[in-house]
Amino acid sequence: MAVRLLYFAWVRERIGVADEEVPLEGPLPLAALVERLRARTPGHAHALGEPARLRAAINQEFADWNAEVHPGDEVALFPPVTGG
Amino acid sequence: MTFTVRVEAQPFDVAREHARLSALGPGVGAVVLFTGQVRDEPLLLDHYPGMAERQIAARLAEACARWPLLGATIIHRFGPLAVGEGIVLVGTASAHRAAAFESASFLMDWLKTSAPFWKKAAGGWVEARASDELAAARWLETQEQLR
């Protein structure tokens, strides 16, 4: 099983990819998933080093760091939005 | 009643969107149309396809629950945009002006803080502003007062 990750704005630029899949065997808090992602590449570490500067969505709904990610979920990581 | 959400790259036609809302029926007595446009320097708008439409539709459903709207149109553009080009259009139609004005303001304030779009200028990614969070939060206080 896996989880699909999407990155936007400077998070995408620092990581160097717009999306990727990472293995996930069972439910995991979002904060723990982000910690795992940080270890993947220096780009990940740079992009995800300060969770206070990030926002997240699980299956296209805003989620906090305690929320559980399940295999098959779509998880997005991005800076605070600046639309409108 | 017609409620429309569009997330697209191409420019919008303000006159056409106004005409559509004003022609929704004989009960329409007020149409408010807000447009936001690029100022000072060109922008590139990044967005999260799918979540953008979903979040805007959710805000629109909240507006419909709070005001007696007869119709609404929300258009948000993405991609490269030149100075003076429209970025966002929020249009509301109601019997009376208060509902149309207030719901348009509510929708804009919430789009700023919950629609997944990101602006990039020549100097880099635009930072989110605390004042936008406060503008959206004041509607929560209004909701408390109404209860």
Image: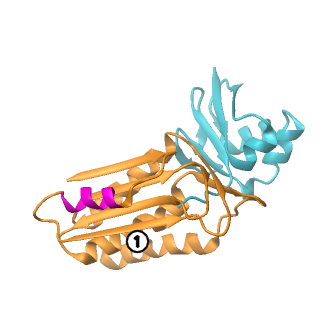
- Quarter placement of the C terminus of chain B: bottom left
Q: Quadrant of residue A71?
A: top right
Q: Where B129 falls versus B71 (above or below)?
A: below
Q: Is A2 in front, or is B30? A: B30
- The location of residue B101, given as percent across then percent down, is 33, 74
Q: Where B131 falls versus A69 (above or below)?
A: below
Q: Is residue B116 left or right of residue B54?
A: right
Chain coloured orange = B
Q: Quadrant of residue B17?
A: bottom left
Chain coloured cyan = A
On what subunit does the disc labeled 1 rest? B
Q: Residue at x 61, y 63 (%)?
A: B83
Q: Is residue B146 left or right of residue A39?
A: left
Q: Quadrant of residue A23?
A: top right
Range of magenta residues: B15-23
Q: Where B144 falls versus A62 (above or below)?
A: below
Farthest residue to the right: give it.
A42
Query: In the rendered image, which residue does mark 1 sit on?
Result: B105
What secondary structure is the stretch in magenta mostly built from?
helix
Farthest residue to the left: give it.
B26
- The location of residue B43, given as percent across then percent down, is 65, 57
